[in-house]
Amino acid sequence: MTLDDMKSLLAGRLGQRTDIDNMIYSEIQQAQRTLEKTPPYPWFLLNRITMEYNLFQNFLPANFIELSEDIIYITKRTIDTAYFAEPAKVYGGYLEHIATAGADRLGRPRNFRLFQDFIEFFPPPDQSYTVSLNYYGKQDPLTGPASTNKWSMLAEDLLVAEAGWHVARNIRDNEAATLFGQDRAEARRRIAQETTSKLESSRRAVIGSGEDALLGQHSWEAGHQ
């Protein structure tokens, strides 16, 4: 659904009101921002990116929310044309555990930590490495009436219910707020089931192939009660 489609649907559920269009637009946009700050996250926010890192401290992807697991993968030295036969695993950790004696020496990273908008490697890289990250990423915001994104196409029921609950509270419509609250809970259950099903299917496929799983094991519903 487009942003305008969701606005029309929400306005219809509030009695075809036309005096709160701007509020509805704003609350739909805010609903996306709120959901992208509330872990665990739905399956459709999963991303995989390959980047070249050669510094101790490096920028994370611009749309980064959080890693889907506590491992990233070095796939090759950037100067090489061939990838490693088996990616080298780099494990996340707390600074007091990974910044040990000698950790300031250059080498192939063995550990990392996230700090603000950066990823830091221990030991610092002795050269440029090609690194694969599996992470949850923000969607582009809904900025115009005809705009869409994965939230509006795959979780429009949740966006409408989340925004509708806030709009109904703002206009003091307690009955509508209750109904939107019920819709929100049902949408969260649906997305939780989808996320669990897709992650389980991915893990079964990986186990069958004898490879390591690359996806996180969050239960989406647990963080959205």
Image: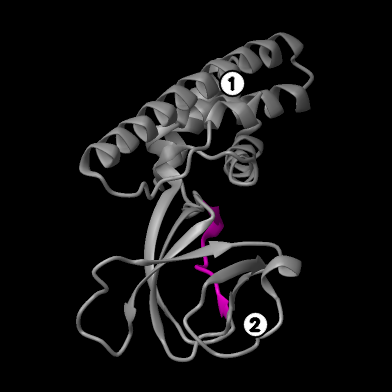
Which residue is identified by label 1? 184
Q: Find residue 17 and report its image quarter.
A: top right
Residue 198, magenta (yes or no): no
* Label 1 secondary element: helix
Residue 60, magenta (yes or no): yes
Toward the viewer: 167 or 213? 213
The residue drawn where x is 70% and y is 16% is: 177
The spot of residue 145 in percent (x, y) is: 45, 45
The residue drawn where x is 67% and y is 13% is: 176
Inspect this view and state whether residue 30 appears. Answer: yes
**Looking at the image, which residue sits at the far top?**
175
Q: Amino acid at mark 2?
A: Ala
**Looking at the image, which residue sits at the far front?**
101
Q: Amino acid at mark 1?
A: Arg
The spot of residue 221 in percent (x, y) is: 56, 26
Quick one: label 1 or label 2, which is nearer the N terminus? 2
Q: Is residue 110 above or below residue 157?
A: below
Does residue 177 appear left or right of residue 152 in this picture?
right
Toward the viewer: 182 or 218? 218
The residue drawn where x is 46% and y is 27% is: 191
Which residue is identified by label 2? 103
Magenta range is 58-67
CA gap, disc 1 to disc 2?
48 Å
Tag shown at residue 221: none
Q: Is residue 38 above or below residue 96?
A: above
Does residue 132 appear left or right of residue 204 in this picture?
right
Q: Is residue 171 above or below residue 31?
A: above
State the predominant SS element of the stretch in magenta: strand
The residue drawn where x is 23% and y is 69% is: 85
Inspect this view and state whether residue 1 appears. Answer: no
